[in-house]
Image: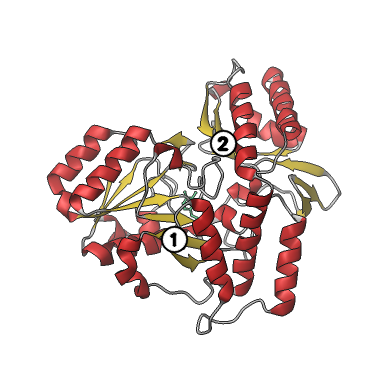
Amino acid sequence: MDLFNVYPINPINIVRAKGSSVWDAAGTEYLDLYGGHAVISIGHSHPHYVEALTAQLNKIGFYSNSVEIPLQKQLAHKLGEMSGKDDYALFLCNSGAEANENALKLASFHNGRKKIIAFTNSFHGRTSLAVATTDNPAIVAPVNQTENVVFLPFNDEEALTGAFQNFGDEIAAVIIEGIQGVGGIREASIAFLRLIRSLCDQYGTVFIADAVQCGYGRTGDFYSQDYAGVDADIYSMAKGMGNGFPIGAISISPKFKASFGMLGTTFGGNHLACAAAIAVLNVIKEEDLLTNTQSVGDYLLTELKKFDRVKEVRGRGLMIGIVLPEELVSVKRDLLVKNRIFTGEAKPNIIRILPALNITRDIADTFLTALDERLKAV
Ligand code: PMP
């Protein structure tokens, strides 16, 4: 049977990993600064993570949601504590798209409306509603889902205010990434986030923060936009939450408790997934990874901005975009082929750095030296 592949594939077979290193079948080591697309939050094969999952699997890996799963409560408690959103409720699912799908569904249950505001360059996943709110030329939404989604220019306060003035009482939800990932590491401005909050309050619209890529500590703030002092009504998360074990979630403001019962999934919140997510939170807390993310992230951003051949450096914490001029786009590929460093991309000319939150300054320096070498070689 043929595989249905939608992603460009590197012909590299990764068979082993530890921390921020991965090895192919021939034993060649690579530095992983892509974190398997922002998924590896505490490093590959972290000892606490391996131990927690192994111990859990030896007890029980899965039973259905028809029984009580105390690990779910433990996870909700820890997440509430670490995100500072203790009074929110947690719904557990399996991926980022599923999290956003449920967030958007919940919004329309709550206010009975259909219209959704999303932004240019957004990425929210590939299920029907999630893809309908995604603005990416390579990804097409099913026709029946697009008619109620209105795309506005990212960070454009005037356009947003205008839309609410025109049809605010029809808008179920606004969905936004605190920092757009796939769209090129673009940060929502504090003023824009505050405006969304105040318009949503004024019109009874649900504010959904898609923290799937930028959340779970990646920026040094738990949900990426905490620095703006703005609370969303729903946060969606996945990727770094399970450090590679599939798990997603939405964290929901107490305002929506009435609609909560309408969500469900077979695998969401299973024993093993919860054990993975709890282990990740334990490591983030015990190893003070939010502080590390901030300090190594700040260091990288400062140093990267000194490269005069780079067009622009954007981001926050360990979510960084390096914008290359046209003549240097080969640098990303060269980093992999010549220096054996995995990075991500957003549009062919933007290198995306999404490493584990526990990378050291030494690792950052290895990357900076390699980038310098590659930039000079072109
Ligand atoms: N939201 C954002 C911001 C993402 O970056 C992604 C994945 N790239 C998703 C949602 C979808 O997540 P998943 O692939 O787990 O469905």
Residue tagged by mark 1? Answer: 250
User: Which of the 4 quarters of the picture holds residue 50?
Assistant: bottom right
Give whichever of 226, 168 is nearer the camera. 226
Tell me the amino acid under the disc marked 1. Ile
Task: Please give the name of the residue rendered at 44% of the width and 42% of the height, measured from the top-left corner.
Answer: 226
Look at the image and tell me in which quarter the C terminus lies: top right
Looking at the rendered structure, the secondary structure element under dot 1 is strand
Q: Is residue 9 left or right of residue 347?
A: right
Q: Pick whichever of labels 2 and 1 is earlier in the sequence.
A: 1
Using a 10 Å C-alpha cutoff, classify the residue at mark 2 as few (fewer than 14 neighbours), some (14 to 19) or many (20 or more): many
- In the rendered view, would you say 319 is above or below 143? above
- Most extreme residue toward the top, as rendered? 308
Residue 15 % position (x, y): 78, 56
Residue 148 % position (x, y): 24, 56
Task: Please give the name of the residue rendered at 36% of the width and 75% of the height, measured from the top-left corner.
Answer: 261
Residue 274 % position (x, y): 59, 67
Give whichever of 248, 77 is nearer the camera. 77
Tell me the amino acid under the disc marked 2. Gly
- In the rendered view, would you say 151 is above or below 14? above
Task: Please give the name of the residue rendered at 44% of the width and 38% of the height, measured from the top-left corner.
Answer: 227
Q: Is residue 344 left or right of residue 264?
A: right
- In the rendered view, would you say 312 is above or below 316? above
Looking at the rendered structure, the secondary structure element under dot 2 is loop
Inter-mark Cα distance, 2 to 1: 22 Å
Q: Is residue 301 left or right of residue 362?
A: left
Whether residue 330 is visible, yes or no, is no
Q: Which mark is residue 317?
A: 2
- In the rendered view, would you say 158 is above or below 67? above
